[in-house]
């Protein structure tokens, strides 16, 4: 088998792809811990959160050329990872019904009743309210930052936060 | 919100933040790398089916069409029969050629070559059999480097040295096992723009669909057409290059595990029967079929995921499907978990519609839709020989979810009951502000058509978001 040429293999075109890839990787890498933290706050599982980061990177790679403004890369990635988390939570609704949550809590798999109560309350909340509350309370973002991430006016975000907290109070 | 509840929230946030900090950078880096790999793989597959614009789409359509007409492309099973392979038991042929008898490719020889995790796993795991056939023709040197096949698909690693002064691209890539053995080209990863520059050489991987239950012979022919110019914009005649080679259809058979599932998922009142799950070093395959009693036509399963866990719980794989092979088989990446303790199959919903919405009755001389889906429109070109079908779909610009294009059946029936061929020319999507317009362009076969004509829409996006789960093991 002829393999002598491999040290010089994949020349100009492949190099340009790997440069793009390296650049993209570097940009995501800068955000990966934040993305993971956001995914973890939604999913509370290391494996699922890593999976969400992986899936978000995959979707971002596919759509990267459609992002015209590089300055919004971070908020765009956050939106994607949140969407990935919501996909996973939709799946879980079926996989882990409430009774199972309670059973797991009994065996110590879920850390505390507070956590279960919050999980249940978040599950009932409107998604947009949940995103606003999570980004503020779990990731310390200001209303302006949340507005930037969710691509909504700041006033809308403030309303969502208010309504979200109200719903949370009702459900807890 | 009371202080108490806010405290709860803040306490939980703090706990979440603390736990999330325990993740290592290596795991995160790996997740990002794998995500990019998956993205590249999905892009390639989409390009293979639809193209990325009018020119590439045309080329892709030609590739797909040609592949289905070329020798060796026998009639595919509409729903491949469950594998006859029994878990872990080699068949008679397999006993004659054990995997260890065949030289394997070495991952070190593929350093700096772009590949996805499945290919990496295949070569690293010693599943890619070495080949060394080489052909020089018209300034090109094509070398087959390796192949790996189970009973559902095959990968061929090949390199091309382009000693001409033109960039080149491939099309009509195929593996031919003879007229009785179905094969279909799925994808060839060719880099971002699908070209190999002048004077360059590179290694590529062709993915070929096989049909479960078929006994593939050893003798095979690899063919590809190398065409000067950019993808979809040729500047000269293509060179058809072929290399006969000996495949190794049996070396992985002892690695194939088949699980009879015979379970059912129900979504929106529609039943989906899941018959078998097959695992091999090349992938995990789930065979399913929509129940015949359904009142809707099921186009696809949305976000199918397999969760596979090892006995001791140390290995858990969440597998998102990578492609739908023949209709009715979902392909997932291989797991590396040899004897899983549990396997769960979940979907986020299905895409399905009432059967009457899949019929489109059109006057092919004017494009007037006599009966059918309101989201669809049809245009006829000035020659009257070309039809453009358009369908609007709402797509979110943010979530990255891929909304599949609609598909039409490749035949249609005119008012006199005569069946005509619909010849695919191209297909592409125009996207703007969360709305997409999918366009498929077809050429009519030139025969007289009694108006109006009935077309069948094989697939369009009509999601029913209702998660369903099946415990396979």
Image (tube, coloured by chain):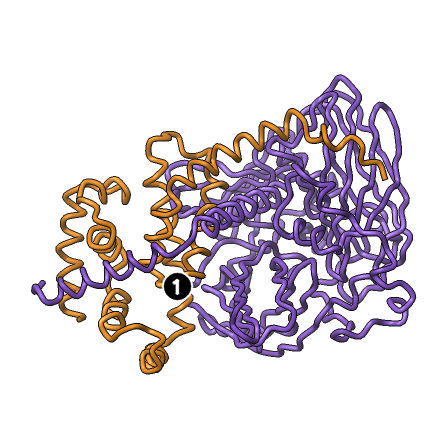
Chain colours: A orange, B purple
Q: Position of residue B297 (x, y in %)?
A: 55, 64
Where does the C terminus of chain B fall, quadrant-wise? bottom right
Location of residue A93 with respect to B453 vertically, above or below: below
Subunit of label 1: A
Return the residue found at the far left: B2
Camera-side residue of B130 and B277: B130
Which residue is at a point 41% across and 57% down the rendered structure image? A49
Q: Residues within 10 Å of mark 1 (few under 14, many from 20)?
A: some
Residue B131 is left or right of residue A73, and the answer is right
Where does the N terminus of chain B fall, quadrant-wise? bottom left
Which residue is at a point 56% across and 52% down the rendered structure image? B360
Q: Position of residue B222 (x, y in %)?
A: 84, 43
Q: Position of residue A115 (x, y in %)?
A: 26, 70
Is residue B374 visible in this depiction of the protein?
no
Residue picked out by circle 1: A45
Residue B94 is left or right of residue B347, and the answer is right
Camera-side residue of B94 and B41: B94
Is residue B98 visible in this depiction of the protein?
yes
Which residue is at a point 53% across and 58% down the rendered structure image? B320
**Tally of marks:** 1
Location of residue A27 with respect to B32 vertically, above or below: above
Q: Position of residue B91 (x, y in %)?
A: 85, 72
Q: Secondary structure at mark 1?
A: loop
């Amino acid at each position: 088998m002829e393999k002598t040429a491999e040290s010089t293999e994949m020349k100009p075109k492949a190099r340009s792809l790997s440069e793009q890839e390296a650049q993209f990787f570097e940009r995501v890498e800068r955000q990966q811990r934040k993305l993971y933290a956001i995914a973890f706050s939604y999913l509370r599982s290391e494996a699922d959160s890593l999976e969400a980061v992986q899936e978000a990177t995959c979707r971002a790679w596919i759509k990267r050329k459609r992002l015209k403004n590089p300055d919004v890369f971070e908020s765009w990635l956050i939106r994607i990872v949140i969407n990935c988390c919501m996909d996973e939570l939709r799946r879980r609704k079926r996989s882990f019904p409430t009774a199972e949550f309670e059973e797991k809590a009994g065996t110590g798999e879920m850390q505390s009743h507070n956590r279960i109560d919050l999980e249940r309350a978040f599950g009932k909340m409107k998604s947009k309210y949940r995103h606003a509350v999570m980004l503020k309370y779990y990731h310390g973002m200001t209303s302006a930052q949340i507005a930037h991430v969710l691509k909504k006016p700041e006033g809308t975000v403030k309303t969502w936060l208010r309504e979200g907290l109200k719903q949370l109070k009702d459900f807890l | 919100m009371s202080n108490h509840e806010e405290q709860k929230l803040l306490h939980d946030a703090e706990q979440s933040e603390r736990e999330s900090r325990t993740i290592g950078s290596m795991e995160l880096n790996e997740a990002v790398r794998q995500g990019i790999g998956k993205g590249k793989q999905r892009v390639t597959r989409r390009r293979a089916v639809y193209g990325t614009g009018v020119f590439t789409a045309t080329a892709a359509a030609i590739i797909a069409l040609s592949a289905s007409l070329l020798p060796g492309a026998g009639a595919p099973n509409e729903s491949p029969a469950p594998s006859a392979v029994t878990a872990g038991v080699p068949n008679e042929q397999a006993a004659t050629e054990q995997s260890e008898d065949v030289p394997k490719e070495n991952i070190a020889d593929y350093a700096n070559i772009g590949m996805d995790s499945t290919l990496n796993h295949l070569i690293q795991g010693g599943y890619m059999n070495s080949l060394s056939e080489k052909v020089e023709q018209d300034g090109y040197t094509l070398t087959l480097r390796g192949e790996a096949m189970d009973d559902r698909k095959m990968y061929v690693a090949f390199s091309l040295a382009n000693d001409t002064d033109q960039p080149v691209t491939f099309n009509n890539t195929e593996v031919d096992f003879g007229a009785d053995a179905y094969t279909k080209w799925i994808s060839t990863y060719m880099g971002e723009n699908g070209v190999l520059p002048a004077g360059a050489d590179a290694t590529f991987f062709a993915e070929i669909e096989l049909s479960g239950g078929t006994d593939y012979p050893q003798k095979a022919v690899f063919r590809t057409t190398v065409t000067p110019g950019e993808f979809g914009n040729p500047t000269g005649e293509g060179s058809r290059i072929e290399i006969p080679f000996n495949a190794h259809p049996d070396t992985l058979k002892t690695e194939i595990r088949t699980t009879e599932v015979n379970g059912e998922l129900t979504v929106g009142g529609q039943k989906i029967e899941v018959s078998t799950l097959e695992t091999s070093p090349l992938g995990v395959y789930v065979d399913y079929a929509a129940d015949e009693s359904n009142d809707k036509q099921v186009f696809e399963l949305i976000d199918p995921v397999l969760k596979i866990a090892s006995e001791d719980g140390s290995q858990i794989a969440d597998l998102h499907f990578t492609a739908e092979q023949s209709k009715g088989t979902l392909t997932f990446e291989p797991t590396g978990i040899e004897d899983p303790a549990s396997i769960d199959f979940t979907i986020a919903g299905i895409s399905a519609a009432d059967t009457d919405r899949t019929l489109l009755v059109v006057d092919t001389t004017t494009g007037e839709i006599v009966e059918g889906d309101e989201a669809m429109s049809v245009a006829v070109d000035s020659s009257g020989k070309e039809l453009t079908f358009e369908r609007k779909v709402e797509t979110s610009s943010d979530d990255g979810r891929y909304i599949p294009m609609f598909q039409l059946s490749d035949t249609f029936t005119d008012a006199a009951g005569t069946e005509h061929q619909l010849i695919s020319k191209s297909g592409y999507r125009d996207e703007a502000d969360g709305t997409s317009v999918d366009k498929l362009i077809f050429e009519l076969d030139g025969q007289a058509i009694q108006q109006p004509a009935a077309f069948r829409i094989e697939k369009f996006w009509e999601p029913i978001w209702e998660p369903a789960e099946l415990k396979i093991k």
